[in-house]
Amino acid sequence: MSLPCLILVAALDGQAALQHAAALAALGPHPWGSPRGPVAAEYVASQFRAAGLQEVRLQPFESHGIKGTNVIGVLRAPGPEFVVLAAHHDTAPAAPGAYDDGAGVGILIEAGRILARVPSRPRTLVFVSFDGEEAWSTGKTTTAGSRAYVQSLGNEARNLAGALVVEMSGFKGGTPVLHPIAYADPLKPGRSVIAPGWLVGALLAGSRDGGAPLGLGDPWLAWLYQPAVRTFRVRLYGDDLSFVQAGLPAAFVSDSSFTAFYPWYHQATDTPDKLDAGALGRMGASVLAAVSALERMPRSSGADPAWFAAGPGAGRGMALRPRRALRGARPPGRALAGRRCGRRALAPGRSLRPRPLAAPGAGGVGLPAALPRRPRPAPVAPGALAPPAAGPPGAGRRGGPAGLRLRRLALGLGGRGGAPRLRAAVDASARSAGPAAPTGPRGAAAGPLRVPDRALW
C-alpha cells in the first residue's frame, strides 16, 4: 500500500461525517420537490466550499414537473478524464434520512476535505450530491437528479473513468460492501445491465490494498448475492442506476446487506442516534481507498458483464474470474482483476488458457472446415490483445487468441459498450425534450435542466 493511501485511509473523521448527517436530519423529512430540499442543497454546497472543493455550484433540474437541485464540486487534474464520487441529500417522504443518505453525504464531504489536501492527482475528481434519488415516492420516475446529471454530461461522458456512489452508511451492525446490481436494460427490454467486471475488480482490489476491504454484496453470502441480483429484480438500488443504464461504469457502497440490513430504513426513526461514528469511519476508509484505485487504474471500457467473484471472504483476498460464456465456449485467456487495480491477471492457482480450437459441430468454438486446425495457442499476456477494428468511440472491446475474437456473453446481460448506449439515450432525450444545457465537469448550466417526462429507462 502506498504512503498517500495510508494517509488517506487513516484520516477520515467518522464523527465529523455523523455531524453532517445530524445537520441534514435536523431539517426533518426533505424529499425531492419539498421546500426543505433547497435548504439541504445549500448546506451541502457550503460544506463543499469549507472542505476545499473548487468550482462548487448548484445544478437545478426539472423532471415530470418537479424541480430539484444537485450540488457539484471539483478537484481538478490536468487531463480530461474524471471520476465521480456521489451521495444524495434528499430523503424518503416520512424519514429524516440520517442513514439514507445524510451519512453518505457526510462521508462525501469529509472525503472531499481529505482529498483536497493532495497536491496533485492523475484524474479530476467530481463530487456530486444528488437530489431526487428517492423519486420513487412520486410514482413518476427514479433517481431523478442523477439522471439529469448524466444527461448534462453530453460528450464529456466518454471521459468518465468510473463512478462510486455512497449510500446508507453508519450502521453499527453492518459491514461495508460493494453493490453491483443488475438493472433493467432501457434499450433492450427483458435484458439487464450491470457494473463492468473491470470496475468491480478495481474497487475491490483498491479497497483491499488500502487496508479497508469491501465485501461484495454481503459479507457471508457473496456467492448467493451474485446470481440473485442477476436473476431477480431486487428493490435495492442507488444513483448508480442512472449511470449503469446509460452505459457508464458505476456501483454503490453501503453497510446494509442481505444478512444485516438497517432496521429503521425509510422510517421516521431514521435519526442520528442510530448511527455509529466508528462505522462511518470504516466506510470512509473503504471509500477513500476505492477512489484512489479509480484515480490510478488503467483506462478501460466496454460493458464487460461476464464476471463472478470467487474466493474466501468475497472482497477480502478474493479474485474476480470470468463467467463461462454461452454455448459451452470458455472465456479468453485472461481473468478479471488481480492485485493491481483494473489490470487483468490470472487468479492465484488457476490457469485460464484458451480452449483448443475445435472443429465445427464439436461443441466448442470452431473454424470453418476449409481452414486447417491450429495448435493450442500460448496464454495471452495482459495488454497484448489487438484493439478492435475501427468503430465508434467507446465501443465494447473484444479479445482472445490471435485470429479469433470471442464475443463475451453472460446469460444475456449487458451490451456492447458505454458510449453507443449513452448516445442513444441522449439522442432520444434530445428528440423529446430539445437540446440540453451544457453542464459537464467544465461548465455550468445556463438554466434549469429539463429531464423529459417520457422516461428513457
Image (cartoon, grey):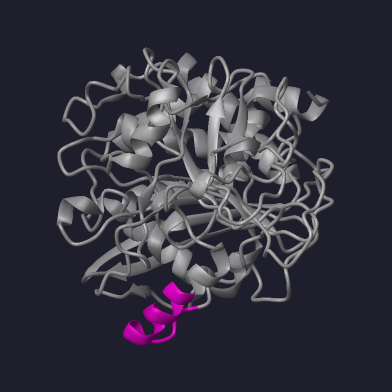
Image-based side of 302 in relation to 436, left or right? right
Q: Where on the picture, by quarter, is residue 454?
A: bottom left
- Image quadrant holding the C terminus, namely bottom left
Q: Which residue is farthest front?
A: 370
Magenta span = 424-437
Please tell me which residue lies in front, 301 or 355: 355
Q: Where on the picture, by quarter, is residue 172?
A: top left
Main SS, magenta region, reads helix
Q: Position of residue 345 (x, y in %)?
A: 75, 35
Q: Position of residue 219 (x, y in %)?
A: 45, 18
Image-based side of 176 in relation to 377, left or right? left
Taking the spot 74% from the left edge, 32% from the top edge, the residue there is: 346
Please tell me which residue lies in front, 435 or 313: 313
Whether residue 431 is visible: yes
Please tell me which residue lies in front, 353 or 375: 375
Taking the spot 42% from the left edge, 53% from the top edge, the residue there is: 412
Asked if 153 appears above or below 24 in the picture, the reply is below
Q: Position of residue 174 (x, y in %)?
A: 39, 17
| Residue 69 drawn in magenta | no
Taking the spot 72% from the left edge, 64% from the top edge, the residue there is: 80
Asked if 53 appears above or below 228 in the picture, the reply is below
Please tell me which residue lies in front, 5 or 19: 5
Whether residue 84 is visible: no
Q: Where on the picture, by quarter, is residue 450?
A: bottom left
Q: Position of residue 351 (x, y in %)?
A: 73, 29
- Image quadrant holding the N terminus, namely top right
